[in-house]
Image (spheres, rainbow, N blue to C red):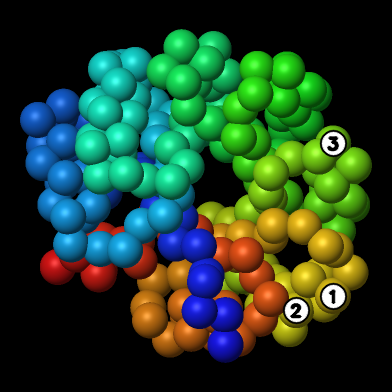
Amino acid sequence: MNEDLVHYLITDPDYYSSDETIFEKKLESILSTTHVDHACFRDKHSSNYEALARIFVRVCQKHNIQQVLLNENIALAKELKCGVHLTSKQFELIKEAKQNDMYVVISCHDILQVEKAQKAFVNAVTYSPIFKTPNKGEPKGVPNLKKLLSIFDMNIIALGGIITQEHVTQISKTRAYGFASIRYFLNESV
């Protein structure tokens, strides 16, 4: 069993709120009660994205989160001196992020994307979806994850539908670097 499994929290305004006060209180509560190693601010539609991102980085730094990342936004990540989690449509931005000494994670959904990410020397990839999750297609499953892990020698983070301790236990029985989730950390902080 992989005892050093990285716990990677990802936010979503549907679960965290776009209200800055509520967002900060919720994040503070989760980080105070739950094990989190890496954290990513992911928000694709709030009009106050930048203000929320600043709160996110400040609260994560207060809680000594190892890697603090912003989803997609290299310019703001550079300004806030944090890492970036790129989407599977942003491979062309890896070089820019690396030139700015950022910790870079990129989302991958197939073996070709993982191979491309490895050649670009990213710090880690997320591979998804592992379990059933809304609007993300057919789950890859743990056997497929294990096969991928046997091919690549890099930091691969399982993502997608990981909401229970049983899911985390299944991931911990692989060579995965970690797991990422939105809902798991919400459940754990209750």
Within 10 Å of the Cα at label 1, are there few (<14), some (14-19), or many (20+) other Cα atoms? Answer: few
Q: Which residue is mark 2?
A: 146
Q: Residue at x 77, y 57 (%)?
A: 154
Q: Residue at x 57, y 87 (%)?
A: 1
- What SS does tag 1 mark? helix
Say which quarter of the image contains residue 140: bottom right
Q: Residue at x 26, y 28 (%)?
A: 58
Pointer 2 with pointer 3, Cβ within 8 A: no
- Residue 115 in percent (x, y) is at 89, 51
Answer with mark 2 or mark 3, whichever residue precedes in sequence: 3
Q: Which residue is mark 1?
A: 150
Q: Nearer the viewer, mark 2 or mark 3?
A: 3
The kind of residue tagged 2 is Lys
Q: Which residue is mark 3?
A: 120
Please indicate whether residue 37 sits to the left or right of residue 30 in the image. Answer: right
Q: Residue at x 36, y 46 (%)?
A: 65
The kind of residue tagged 1 is Ser
Pointer 1 with pointer 2, Cβ within 8 A: yes
- What SS does tag 3 mark? loop
The kind of residue tagged 3 is Ala
Q: Is residue 53 above or below residue 147?
A: above
Does residue 128 appear in this view? no
Please indicate whether residue 9 sits to the left or right of residue 77 in the image. Answer: left
Say which quarter of the image contains residue 2: bottom right
User: Which label is found at residue 165?
Assistant: none
- What SS does tag 2 mark? helix
Is 183 in front, or is 34? 34
Distance from disc 3 to disc 1, alpha carbons, whole Å, reads: 19 Å
Q: Is residue 117 above or below residue 110?
A: above
